[in-house]
Image: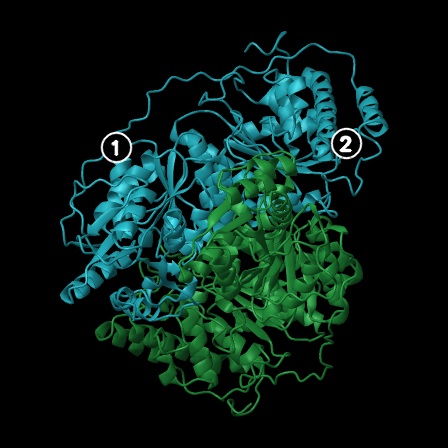
Chain colours: A cyan, B green
């Protein structure tokens, strides 16, 4: 606690000191955005008392040790208020006021919106409506590790139009997360106009009450009210608390207060800035007693249990859907690693995450049909040391695409799984078929993308993705597929398996998931005609083993055919093409090229050109 | 009205007839799912009275003319209840009961979940939580065309966990959409367990009241209550109505009623099915007076005004951001085509859709920071004949990825635009940079993807995308770029522009958007060294002009370099690679290959390898 000084004072008498802190936060926010020439100073000004109260009276944390698992947590969901957060850190003393002036510069980690490049940031924010979802995960993590830390989330009012906020609202109350306290900074102004609800505090209160939260409405510039609301939140049991704080955008600077047209606009250096700073400085009251922040909690606990898995109990030729093998694998993993948790979107009996739930109900989080909060909660859990496996139908992970984007920006350790990929699901039709999930996941340069074809590789890849640092995705299939690997086989991320090869191979056929068995069938049909092909299982779609692919392309006279239960763009064909382009090799792609329809899996796999007969035809060039 | 018979009877005395219809809908739903061997009969049974009342008493529509713009509209948001919808059509008489037995077959349009392959379906459903968003758009369309049609949306209870439902809730009340009536079928059971709120009707009522809807709670199996609630909805002015209907999943079949484990499970043919059918048949009461559905409205109206645009007023060398040219173009287009509407996510002053708003406030829909309902509303508008341009930052369109997926499945005529693409936005940092939007859009095989580099091409492509049938996406940039095309230049979708060429070109450099100017700079730098390159503006990223790309690759000895302000996977490099693979040509890709950070646009464009000096180096092979 080297960064604070003086003696502890009761809450009520802290108000003048906190008011001065709030004013300094305004001054610093305004100054650094003007120095940067861009940013959102007015949104910082509206929340200055809220942040001052949180950081200098309410929260218990050790700023020198952001990794302390028992620190209270703060998520700035309104990420464009980043300068306010950075200014609070400067006030705490962990960065300097000179650092603040590097805001938004290429050589500074004080980015335009907060990212976990900074050790005090759990999740990147700036895509609005995500912070509360992460906050749910962070608060659940306290329960997981039996910590008493509390989680605070500061939202803008505009972002509560995002549905994800209401997913979080409902999930947080269903989890009875009383360690979670959120605050909405209701300054009434969005970017382009007044917000949907303007300053209608009653409407906010009604909506959050209806979502079963404890709700307190306050004047967000009255520190006595702010402190009292935080007291009330701490006392509220069995439900999360929402503090609805009525504020004024640009508060403290009379010529911008409550005015349209000042969102995302720095004050011009010179007269405009100087006038604002002078006005703010005039608001500093006589320096009161310095305050001491409450001490952080110190809890000793045993390290999490982490073991390795024995090989799975599948036998060659067993018929097991990879989605089921996934469920079995996470349950197996949960038994040897306490950090593993699972999240579901009410499809646990289809993705088989129910196997985990049955064994570890305390580490299973049912998010119902709300994929954004499922992924967002996983992001929060991952940020605090859990290894979360959120899973649903792969098609519905696209509901969380923006969360996945932000998870990649944060490089969070989340392990997503999507089942029911591709036309091979059959009769349910296109709405349930993921045919663009590989494109979505591969687009992010740091997401590992895995696509096993059998139960053994699924099992081993679940373990591999749990050990892999950073975000990862596993695609699983609905139909049963034969076990083709022995239990001792290893599957490093970034590898592939050559399943068939001969010195006289005329083409390389690369499949993954359900197309591997089609490729093997094609191999046998062709072999009967004395045409030999190399068959590759590209279980690691990102990264790919470029060297092995290049080698195989060379060995087979540059003839490379990919076959995937995915649309033509962004999937396996593109991954292989990019990898072997360096050798001057191109790819012939078998993929789904139109919006599919209902039918049996076999009909669809054949109709959309993925079956063995299409592979045979491609190899033979007919 | 050939499909109805008998005489009109007052609502109260219709109950026995409607009850029989509900029973027949149950019988048909159960029978056709058993025939298909899969499907969701129990979710059909819970909503049978609701659908019977809507289709045979409440809604005014001509089933023989689904294109009638004044028909009342129905959206089955709980798309897995498709058999119930199809059974209603059979009861109406527009398909046969034999047709019903083709459910889920490859040769039938009666797919597992409804799609607009069927003329009575406006939008594909089956990804839960989307129907109410589409319903908002359909209801807004009634206002647009001055029709009195009403819009009905049937939701499942489980899907109200989706945030998109709450986006729709808030937007619908802000639009005072009293022609919109939604019904939640609260059967209390999700797929894997009881829903989040189980049968807590009070909780539903509180949440929808808080969202400022008129709310009626009823027993969803009591037709008198259903009819009365629909009367009440019709009478409610100034706000949409939500009917919260308490129901029992599997209602009517005693051995499945209210039981877990029956979601998505057809009854087995034989004893199980026969027992169910016998029980349902026993519920048929003495055949009452046949009923006549209310007559459809007949409204005559002038056809929408549709003109063509004169060339834009830009001059070569002007410096205009494509995002601003987009705003100008939609406003220009709005003046000549009444069908054009615009939707915003509270960034209209950044995307410049505010230019449209200022001219056509009645055709501008502010959805606030809620991208799912923005795209969903556009889907509903498009389904009913409008040409909607929803726009926001391209990064935040990913929030609506699942809606975009379903819009593609529906092949809807929506025209999306995403601004602030790529690292060239600069200081705001990665959360605001779309670097995967091309991958997301290109993955869908039927979305046209356009990426103009200057104001003229933006303008002409806005007009082209409005004329193009089906979904389209335009990517625009934040920085100003020089006008390089004359106002008479044409830009067909699927085309490209060769900007520089000579007989001695050593490589083809393909850019789009902000990289075109970098490619032109590289051209000039190289020309000074007597190295000549071909420069292509790939303004149409999907479809691409494969023939022209192949020609250029051949002309430049197979050396093709792409440069894009996008991640390496799924964008321009992959599009070109797939197009020229047939000629045996490969692509060298310059693209963003890591999570970027804040900085000036120039710093970032250079640091991530997109600037002219990187192009020069790539051409020279250094």
Q: What residue did someone put label 1 on?
A: A336
Is disc 1 placed on a helix, strand or loop?
helix
How packed is label 1: few (under 14 Cα within 10 Å), some, or many (20 or more)?
some
Instruction: Please tell me which of labels 1 and 2 falls first in the chain.
Output: 2
Left or right of A285? Residue A298 is left
Any part of residue A557 in sight = yes
Left or right of B87? Residue B596 is right
Left or right of B196? Residue B210 is right
Q: In this picture, is A217 found above or below B346?
A: above
Q: Residue at x 61, y 21 (%)?
A: A89
Quarter that holds the N terminus of chain B: bottom right
Q: In this picture, is B602 found above or below A306?
A: below
Left or right of A611? Residue B356 is right
Q: Which mark is residue A186?
A: none
Foreground pick, A512 / A385:
A512
Mark 1 vs mark 2, CA separation in Å = 53 Å
How packed is label 2: few (under 14 Cα within 10 Å), some, or many (20 or more)?
many
Pointer 1 and pointer 2 on the same chain? yes
Foreground pick, B212 / B335:
B335
**Residue B541, quarter of the rendered image:** bottom right
Q: Which mark is residue A251?
A: 2
The number of discs equals 2
Q: In this picture, is B412 found above or below A120?
A: below
Is disc 2 placed on a helix, strand or loop?
loop
Q: Residue at x 64, y 79 (%)?
A: B70
Which chain's residue wears label 2?
A
Foreground pick, A618 / A323:
A618
Q: Whole-percent x and y of residue A208? A: 59, 44
Foreground pick, B33 / B245:
B33
Q: In this picture, is A588 found above or below A584?
A: below
Q: Whole-percent x and y of residue A132? A: 54, 39
């Amino acid at each position: 606690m080297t960064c604070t000084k003086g003696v502890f004072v009761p809450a009520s008498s802290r108000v003048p000191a906190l008011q001065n802190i709030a004013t300094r936060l305004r001054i610093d926010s305004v100054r650094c955005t003007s120095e940067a020439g861009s940013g959102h100073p007015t949104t910082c000004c509206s929340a200055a008392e809220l942040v001052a109260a949180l950081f200098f009276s309410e929260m218990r944390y050790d700023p020198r040790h952001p990794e302390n698992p028992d620190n209270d947590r703060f998520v700035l969901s309104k990420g464009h208020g980043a300068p306010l957060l950075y200014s609070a850190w400067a006030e705490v003393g962990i960065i300097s006021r000179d650092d603040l002036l590097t805001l938004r510069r290429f050589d500074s980690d004080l980015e335009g919106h907060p990212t976990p490049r900074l050790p005090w940031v759990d999740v990147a924010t700036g895509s609005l409506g995500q912070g509360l979802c992460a906050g749910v995960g962070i608060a659940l993590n306290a329960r997981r590790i039996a910590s008493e830390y509390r989680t605070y989330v500061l939202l803008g009012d505009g972002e509560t139009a995002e549905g994800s906020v209401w997913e979080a609202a409902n999930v947080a109350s269903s989890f009875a997360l009383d360690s979670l306290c959120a605050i909405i900074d209701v300054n009434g102004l969005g970017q382009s106009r007044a917000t949907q609800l303007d300053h209608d505090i009653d409407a906010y209160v009604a909506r959050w009450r209806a979502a079963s939260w404890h709700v307190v409405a306050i004047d967000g510039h009255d520190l006595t009210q702010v402190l009292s609301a935080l007291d009330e939140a701490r006392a509220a049991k069995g439900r999360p608390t929402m503090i609805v704080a009525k504020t004024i955008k640009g508060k403290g600077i009379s010529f911008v207060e409550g005015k349209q047209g000042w969102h995302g606009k720095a004050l011009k250096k010179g007269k405009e800035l100087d006038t604002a700073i002078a006005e703010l400085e005039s608001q500093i009251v006589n320096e009161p007693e310095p305050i001491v922040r409450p001490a952080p909690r110190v809890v000793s606990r045993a390290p999490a249990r982490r073991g390795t898995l024995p090989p799975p109990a599948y036998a060659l030729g067993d018929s097991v859907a990879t989605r089921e093998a996934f469920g079995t694998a996470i349950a197996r993993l949960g038994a040897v690693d306490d950090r593993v948790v699972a999240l579901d979107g009410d499809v646990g009996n289809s993705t088989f995450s129910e196997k985990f739930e049955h064994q570890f109900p305390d580490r299973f989080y049912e998010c119902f049909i709300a994929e954004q909060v499922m992924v967002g909660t996983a992001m929060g859990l991952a940020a605090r040391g859990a290894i979360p496996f959120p899973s649903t139908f792969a098609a519905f992970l696209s509901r969380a695409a923006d969360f996945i984007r932000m998870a990649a920006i944060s490089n969070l350790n989340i392990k997503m799984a999507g089942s029911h990929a591709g036309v091979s699901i059959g009769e349910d039709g296109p709405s349930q078929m993921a045919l663009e999930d590989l494109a979505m996941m591969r687009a992010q340069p740091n997401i590992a993308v895995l696509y096993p074809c059998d139960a053994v590789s699924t099992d081993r890849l679940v373990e591999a993705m749990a050990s892999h640092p950073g975000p990862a995705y596993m695609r699983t299939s609905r139909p049963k597929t034969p076990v083709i690997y022995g239990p001792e086989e290893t599957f490093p991320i970034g590898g592939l398996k050559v399943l068939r090869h001969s010195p006289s191979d005329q083409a390389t056929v690369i499949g993954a998931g359900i197309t591997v068995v089609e490729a093997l069938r094609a191999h046998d049909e062709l072999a009967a005609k004395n045409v030999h092909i190399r068959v590759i299982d590209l279980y690691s779609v990102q990264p790919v083993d470029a060297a092995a692919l290049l080698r195989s392309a060379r060995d087979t006279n540059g003839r490379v055919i990919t076959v995937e239960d995915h649309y033509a763009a962004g999937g396996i064909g593109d991954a292989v093409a990019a990898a072997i382009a360096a050798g001057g090799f191109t790819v012939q792609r078998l993929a789904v090229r139109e919006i599919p329809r209902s039918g049996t899996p076999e009909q669809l796999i054949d109709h959309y050109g993925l079956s063995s007969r299409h592979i045979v035809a491609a190899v033979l060039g007919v």
